[in-house]
Amino acid sequence: MFSLGKKELKNKILGGWTGKSYGAMMGQPMEFAAQGEIYQGSLDIHPESPEVWLHNEDDLYTNMAFLEVLRDKGLDASQENFADVFRRSKFMLWHANGQARQNLLAGIPPNLSGHPQYNPHADDIDFQIECDFIGIISPGLSKVC
């Protein structure tokens, strides 16, 4: 059996967040640039400083909003708890997430807000990008995730 002390676990969790943040920073200048092609070799990327891009980085601030729900409600947080933070949020959202928020504001229930019947962007990967927090805070706990 594998185990970690609290200090080691905290270090690994912080490392996960650092990696997520760094990946978002390095990937942001390339987002949507490689449509229909696969890059070969090294890329010449010069990311802007965090002060420029961080306030518009939905890969991070949506995670933070969901983490606040878990902090306040615990692992038994309901769909409605998560929907409420999304519904009340003022941060920018795009495509599937933006439509989901509009759906929630229009009274569509959380479990249908991303359904193709109500969301033309249902095949986007928005939540797949923003659900890292679940694994990062639950290392080795696949049943909790």
Image: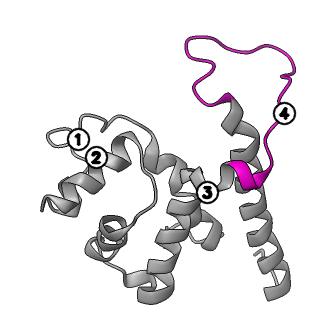
| Residue 95 visible in the displayed image | yes
- Checking the image for residue 70, the label placed there is none
> Looking at the picture, does residue 78 appear above or below residue 94?
below
Mark 1 secondary-structure assignment: loop
Q: Residue at x 74, y 55 (%)?
A: 51
Q: Which residue is mark 3?
A: 55
Q: Which residue is mark 1?
A: 119
Front residue of 12/92: it is 92
Question: In the rendering, at what x and y percent does residue 48 appear?
Answer: 78, 42
Name the side, left or right, on which 46 lies relative to 144: right
Mark 4 secondary-structure assignment: loop
> What is the crowding at mark 3: few (fewer than 14 residues within 10 Å), some, or many (at least 20)?
few
> Looking at the picture, does residue 144 appear above or below residue 108?
below
Please provide the residue range marked out in magenta.
Answer: 30-52
Q: Residue at x 14, y 58 (%)?
A: 106
- Checking the image for residue 99, the label placed there is 2
